[in-house]
């Protein structure tokens, strides 16, 4: 366990994770396995909102751009980015995928930015960042 001031480590053990999440722990990176959002999450709006909140809490940010609040989500996994984009559109938010190449990590980074109805989105999925 790492000593942190504002974070804690959480562990959860199950022999069903691979079945539930659709990927294999020992089969390589998320990118290689094209990890996405499982269908059972996409089909349930309650699960969808919780999933989005978790994704945005871990790999997203809330920031100001020229005085306007924005929210973005970043991943190197295009399959996950496509899933997040389709879920956001399904719940009524317009998105665009932007790409950039990370020379240090030698891979493409994908970013989804929400710039319209940001406060509604934040409230809808109960997003918070500190």
Image: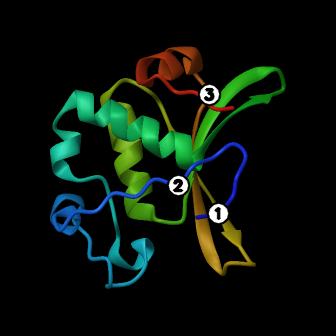
| Real-space CA distance between mark 1 and mark 2, rounded to the nearest whole angstrom | 8 Å
Seen at 41% across and 43% down, the residue is 85
Q: Which mark is residue 9?
A: 2
Which tag, 3 or 2, sits closer to the chain's start? 2
Q: Which residue is nearer to you in this view: 51 or 63?
A: 51
Seen at 75% across and 21% down, the residue is 68
Q: Which residue is mark 3?
A: 115
Mark 3, other Cα within 10 Å: few <14 / some 14–19 / many ≥20: some
SS at circle 1: loop
Q: Is residue 122 above or below residue 3?
A: above
Mark 2, other Cα within 10 Å: few <14 / some 14–19 / many ≥20: few
Q: How is the image coloured?
A: rainbow
Where is residue 45 drawn, in percent x and y? Answer: 23, 29
Q: Which mark is residue 2?
A: 1
Where is residue 30 drawn, in percent x and y? Answer: 41, 71
Q: Quadrant of the C terminus?
A: top right
Seen at 44% across and 27% down, the residue is 93
| Real-space CA distance between mark 1 and mark 3, rounded to the nearest whole angstrom | 36 Å
Residue 66 image-quadrant placement: top right
Query: Residue 97, can we see it?
Result: no
């Amino acid at each position: 366990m790492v000593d942190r001031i504002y974070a804690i480590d959480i562990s959860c053990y199950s022999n069903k994770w691979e079945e539930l999440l659709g990927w294999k722990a020992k089969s390589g990176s998320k990118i290689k396995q094209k990890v996405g959002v499982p269908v059972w999450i996409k089909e349930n709006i309650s699960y969808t909102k919780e999933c989005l909140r978790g994704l945005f809490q871990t790999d997203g940010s809330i920031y100001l751009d020229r005085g306007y609040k924005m929210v973005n989500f970043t991943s190197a996994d295009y399959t996950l980015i496509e899933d997040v984009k389709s879920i956001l559109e399904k719940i009524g938010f317009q998105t665009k995928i932007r790409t950039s190449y990370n020379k240090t990590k030698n891979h493409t980074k994908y970013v989804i930015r929400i710039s319209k109805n940001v406060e509604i989105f934040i409230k809808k999925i109960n997003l918070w960042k500190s």
